[in-house]
Image (cartoon, rainbow, N blue to C red):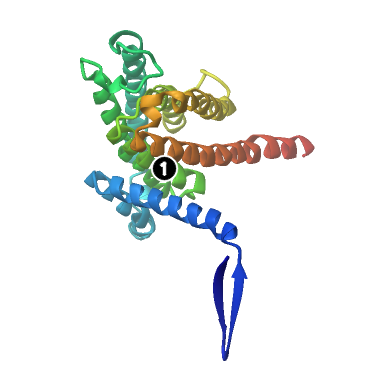
Amino acid sequence: MANTTLSLGLLDVTLSVPSEVWQPLDAGYSTAAKYGQWIQSELVIDPLYWLLVPYIIGQPIFSDFVAYTRMYEKNKTFFKYVMGGYNLIMSVFSLCCAAVAFYCLAFTIPTRIYSHDLFSEATGLYSKVTWVFYVSKYVEFLDTYFLVLCGRPVSWLQYIHHIGAVLDMGFLYHGQNDGVWIFVGFNGVIHTVMYYYYACCILKWKFTLMPKNFITIMQLLQFFSGLTIYYSYSSVEGFWQDERKRNTWYFTYAYVGAVTMLFFNFYLQTYIKKGSKAKDI
């Protein structure tokens, strides 16, 4: 039995609380504290993480600058070509990364997919494509800044998605997390289509690959299938015994789970509710 003293002004009250009540709370706090320390230790490894700071605080500053200088209105044609070119480049880049990741999986990685040593692949290609894809997540900050440039609102989906992608890919790369091929391969395929769609919208090209809402459906399928496949790595002994890989596994589920809910809400609000209102009208 543990004694807890509550101070109520001039009166101190001592309560006797069974120790069994505190043990789960203490254990939960200790686990959370250790996990926080792990995230802190990861963030000091790579100075690139500091780019998150200007991404976060720079948006309102850039918004004021754009409004003051009217730079977009004065150079609209120029910026449209810049944004269109950027999206085309990112589409091709994403396709190449996905192709390389799946190539490594099929031809250069000597072990099984569910293994704890995929980064031991002899050519080093698996590690290189992971690093390049990780760095590209910083480049994708431009997605948000282009929205600010055009005077469009930045949603929580956009905000959390880009911050979390940097952190998750960073943890996956630096921790040599074997399941990173899921992120690179699946996300690369989705971004190939998504960036091409944006390029078509900006450059006024006809997008004929699929209906617009299918892109969001593909993103949701990516999240569900990716998490399902990634789950089996928890059964790989060498993987799960590695604290760094295990913690990244938890982080990935938390991040992707949150983004999945945000994307689902976006689909609900954009295509289902708005679609039903249009029919009513």
Q: Residue at x 70, y 39 (%)?
A: 273
Residue 122: percent from left, percent from top? 21, 15
Quarter residue 188 falls in: top left
Give the quadrant of the C terminus: top right
Q: Is residue 209 visible?
A: yes
Query: Where 96 sits versus 157, above or below?
Result: above
Q: Residue at x 43, y 21 (%)?
A: 189
Q: Is residue 180 visible?
A: no
Q: 194 or 126, which is in the foreground?
A: 126
Disc 1 packing (10 Å; few <14; some 14–19; many ≥20): some
Q: Left or right: 214 with respect to 97?
A: right
Query: Where 91 sits versus 9, above or below?
Result: above
Q: 258 or 60, which is in the foreground?
A: 258
Residue 69: percent from left, percent from top? 33, 57
**Residue farthest toward the right in the current orientation of the protein:** 280
Q: Left or right: 121 with respect to 68?
A: left
Residue 139: percent from left, percent from top? 31, 38
Residue 181: percent from left, percent from top? 37, 23
Q: Residue at x 39, y 45 (%)?
A: 163
The disc labelled 1 sits on which kind of residue?
Answer: Gly
Q: How many marks?
A: 1
Q: Left or right: 184 with respect to 49?
A: right
Q: Residue at x 31, y 20 (%)?
A: 118
Give the quadrant of the N terminus: bottom right
**Residue farthest toward the front in the current orientation of the protein:** 1
The residue carrying mark 1 is 164
Query: Where 2 sits versus 117, above or below?
Result: below
**Residue farthest toward the bottom in the current orientation of the protein:** 10
